[in-house]
Image (cartoon, rainbow, N blue to C red):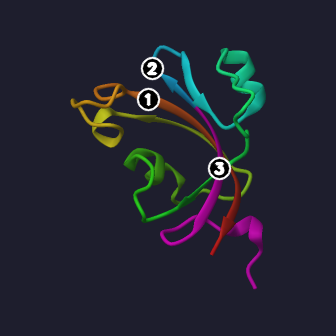
Amino acid sequence: MSNLQDLRAQKGDTVSVHYLGKYQGGKAFDTSMESEAKKAGLYNRSREYKPIQVKLGESKVIPGFEEALIGMKINEEKEVTIPPEKGYGKSGKHPMAGKTLVFKLRVTNIKR
């Protein structure tokens, strides 16, 4: 059996990840971490702050977010800049279309 610490996320895995999403200028728009939400003025009492679970390969999150998770290990942290074409598109109805996004990611678990 392989050591969990050596496991790298791949398609088909369910990855638990804490994230902080910011616009390119540095203003946070979303996070899974309570302390970051409070710092950024985004805190919502009715929200549960915990890592989100992403099943890689199912396209449930923006492409750049999913691509960034592939190859990451448990407890690894990464900051990734996602251009609009890997995010919400260059144009369109989504309020974040056309925006370059910066995500700070920390993998907390990987399930095969």
For this view, does 38 lie left or right of residue 16? Answer: right
Residue 75: image x %, image y %? 74, 51
Marks 3,1: beta carbons within 8 A: no
Residue at x 42% of width, y 64% of height: 58
Q: Disc 2 on helix, strand or loop?
A: loop
Per the rendering, the mark at residue 24 is 2
Helix, strand or loop status at disc 1: strand
Closest to the observer, 111 or 43:
43
CB atoms at circles 2 and 1 under 8 Å apart? yes
Residue 10 within the segment the image draws in magenta: yes
Q: Mark 3 points at which residue?
A: 17
Residue in view at x 69 percent, y 35 percent: 47
Q: Distance between the residues labelled 2 and 1?
A: 6 Å
Residue 68 image position (x, y, % from top left): 49, 49
Determine the residue positioned at 73% across, 40% down. Answer: 48
Q: Choose the circle earlier in sequence order: 3 or 2.
A: 3
* Amino acid type, callout 3: Val
Q: How many marks?
A: 3
What residue is shown with label 1?
101
Label 2: few (<14), some (14–19) or many (≥20) C-alpha neighbours in 10 Å: some
Q: What stretch is highlighted in magenta?
A: 1-20
Mark 3 lies on a secondary structure that is strand
